Amino acid sequence: MSNYLIGIDAGNTSSKVVIFDEFGEIKAEAATPSMRFQQRGPGFEEFDVDQLWADIVVCIKGAIDKSGVDAKDIKGIGVTSFGNGVVFVGKNGEAIAPGCFSHDHRADDIIAMYKEEGTYDKINDLVFGTLFAGEPGPILRWYKEHERGIYNQIGGAMMFKDYIMFKMTGVLATDLNCWGGSFMFDPKTMEYSDELFKLYGIEELKDAMPKLYEATDIVGRVTADVAAQTGLAEGTPVCAGMMDILACLVGSGATGDGIYTAVAGSWSINETHSDKMIPGLSSNMPYLYKGQYLNCSYTGASGSNYEWFTKILGDRAKKEAEERGISFYKVLDEMIEKVDPAKAEVLFGPFVAQPSLHPNTKAHFMNIDSNTTYEELCYAVAEGCAFIHKYHIDILRNAGLPLTEVRLTGGTARSKVWNQIFANVLQAPIVGVDCEETGALGSAIAAGIGAGIYEGYEDAFEKAVKILPPIYPKEGSYGLYEKKYEEWSMLNEILMKYWENK
């Protein structure tokens, strides 16, 4: 009898349900359509929580049907999602408002209020991170200030992934990593803090918080009703899971000392682990093991810049791809490879989304003239995304966290061309994973450990994670890219004055 695991990766643009065997091979997958609402005001980034669940049900059923797997052989389900943002339900578990994505920044006024009150620094000191508007505390306070009628109905608050777990099991639960990385409890005690909720100004919601679990803990089991809807077996265990950035680390087996994980997806995520919480980082989250922390530096845009570029300025490449009958992204890779980095003058600020270097930061090209080619623009976007990762990785390096290699995940990690640019910019080996769904694999591994399929993380890595050969920096590339990065950094410093006065 074979053992199978389901990993659900709930993302900013769509969610995926992936069925793996215990050796990390994908048996089937299905994805939801985009869930984004039209913005109802500046800073609003929302989705329909009921539609999310309906789409997940369709995907689970579709993946099981496609795989041919007997549902009784599915031994566990793990769910991951982006951190921050928030989903909340009423007293009876019903949806009472749209969910909020992590880059929702309606609560910029709340952050400004915290700063004026003097509570902003106190919150940061308590959570060992840097609070921004897209996190649950500020969003919940925004509802208290601006939509009190909905706020008064809140019976449970949770993460994106936790809502899926809630619908599958009826249990309001979360994991330490995701909820801790969203600054909702004291990372020293790993418990909810009266002081923190008072600083947020949402003391009355403390009892609405989900129960905290370790990533591999079984929080509940698939109900009879959900089994009938999805084709899952009733009683299938559901584990607590983790934030997607830790799930990508797990899915790439990056737990060794000196290994960084860079997630070049919707966000520019850069992370490693240590036995200390380092002040001034984006966050210091609970890690896989007690006494250790996931040290993170990030902003809200990486691969999303490429998504924007290909959507708005990708017609030429799309036309060529159609004419040649090859992948659109293959054409873009070829265009990028044509550019000589030593002659490329165009710089790109990869800031299409928030949070960023400043609340008023916007993306931009610099040094365009009448001779600038489309290929140079393609290259500039890739290089700019690598630069924002270097910005964050240098913060971690300068904090004393050693770097020996980088495990690159996210959509752009599938491109060898992008891998080479990252290696040149970061001056470190880039190591990929032979799995295009590392986040889903990471959550499935957690479920496998909880269900007893694996003895622990290292056993799971040996069986289910397949590492690709490293890509090394090109010889002689250090000086060139250091000079270009210094120019890119100087431009951002100059623009900071403009952004501050905007």
Image (cartoon, rainbow, N blue to C red):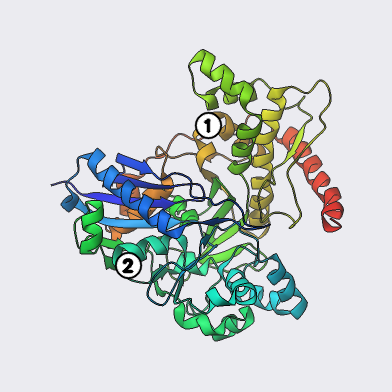
- Looking at the picture, how far across and down is residue 57, in whole percent? 32, 52
Image quadrant assignment for residue 369 = top right
Rendered residue at 35%/49% (across/down):
461
Q: Residues within 10 Å of mark 2 (few under 14, many from 20)?
A: some
Residue matched to label 2: 217
If the image is split into quadrants, where does the C terminus sit?
Answer: bottom right
Q: Position of residue 266 (x, y in %)?
A: 56, 47
Q: Is residue 176 left or right of residue 147?
A: left
- Callout 1: few (<14), some (14-19), or many (20+) C-alpha neighbours within 10 Å? few
- Res. 329 visible in picture: yes
Towards the viewer: 229 or 319? 229
Left/right placement of residue 98 relative to residue 239 reads: right
Residue at point 75%, 35% (across, down): 479
Q: Position of residue 153 (x, y in %)?
A: 48, 77
Q: Nearer the viewer, residue 470 or 484?
A: 484
Q: Is residue 76 above or below residue 195?
A: above
In the rendered image, residue 267, in percent from the top left (x then y), is placed at 59, 50
Q: Quadrant of residue 119?
A: bottom right
The answer, for residue 292, to whether it is visible in the render is no
Q: Residue at x 25, y 54 (%)?
A: 229
Q: Is residue 395 above or below residue 95?
A: above
Query: Which label's residue is closer to the chain start, 2 or 1?
Result: 2
- Examine the rendered structure and indicate whether residue 444 appears above or below residue 135: above
Identified by mark 1, the residue type is Ser
Q: Which residue is mark 1?
A: 415
As helix, strand or loop, the secondary structure at mark 2 comes to loop
Residue type beneath disc 2 = Asp
Task: Tell which of 323 and 245 is nearer to you.
Answer: 323
Secondary structure category for the residue under label 1? loop
**CA–CA distance in space, label 2 to label 1:** 35 Å
Q: What count of labels does the image hold?
A: 2
Q: Report whether 225 appears left or right of 102.
A: left
